[in-house]
Amino acid sequence: MMGKLEDALVQLSAAIEKSDRVEREAAAARAECKLKDGKIAQMLQDLQQIRESNQALYKSKELLQRAMLEQVNDVRQRLDHAGNQNRELEATVHRQRETERVLKDMIRSTKNSPLAPRAVAPRQQPAAASAAEQLAFP
């Protein structure tokens, strides 16, 4: 009976030792879980901040894209207007050159015309008459 009692005590001691070891492991696991829960909570908070930051960046991006699109449209309109003005200016210059050419042709043709006035030697003016002669009646 002593042997059975000693065996029972050995088994009890082993069971207590095993129970203590399991309890220590469970405490360590709980501590690790608590630590990981804290990390998860921090990560969830960081994730929320990142989402908020991302939304703010997205809104800023949209506003910037709209502003850039408006600026691009404004530049396009200015370029179109400048192009139209340039075409009008080129047409005006072309018309002026054509008018100049026509006028030069007209001048050339009048120089060669038999009806064009010819250069005549200047006439000599008779000597100036006295005031009395000018007032005399014929």
Image: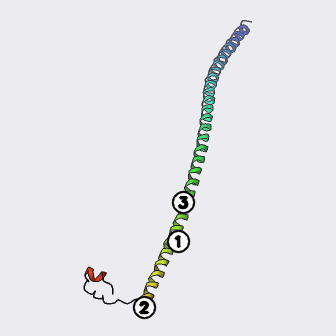
Nearer to the camera, 132 or 56: 132
The local secondary structure at tag 2 comes to: loop
Mark 3 belongs to which amino acid? Leu
Q: Viewed as shown, does residue 31 lie left or right of 115?
A: right
Dot label at residue 112 = 2
* In the depicted structure, whether residue 42 falls above or below residue 27: below
* Residue pictured at 70% horizontal, 11% vertical: 12
* Residue pictured at 40% horizontal, 89% vertical: 117
- Distance between the alpha carbons at the discs numbered 2 and 3: 49 Å
Q: Earlier in the sequence, mark 3 or mark 1?
A: 3
Dot label at residue 79 = 3
The local secondary structure at tag 1 comes to: helix
Q: Quadrant of the N terminus?
A: top right
Q: Earlier in the sequence, mark 2 or mark 3?
A: 3
What colour-coding does the image apply? rainbow
Locate residue 14: give its quadrant: top right
Q: Earlier in the sequence, mark 2 or mark 1?
A: 1
The residue labelled by disc 1 is 91
**Which of labels 2 and 1 is toward the front?**
2
Nearer to the camera, 10 or 118: 118
Q: Circles 2 and 1: CB distance less than 8 Å?
A: no
Q: Quadrant of the C terminus?
A: bottom left
Mark 2 belongs to which amino acid? Asn
Nearer to the camera, 24 or 85: 85
* In the depicted structure, whether residue 135 falls above or below residue 89: below
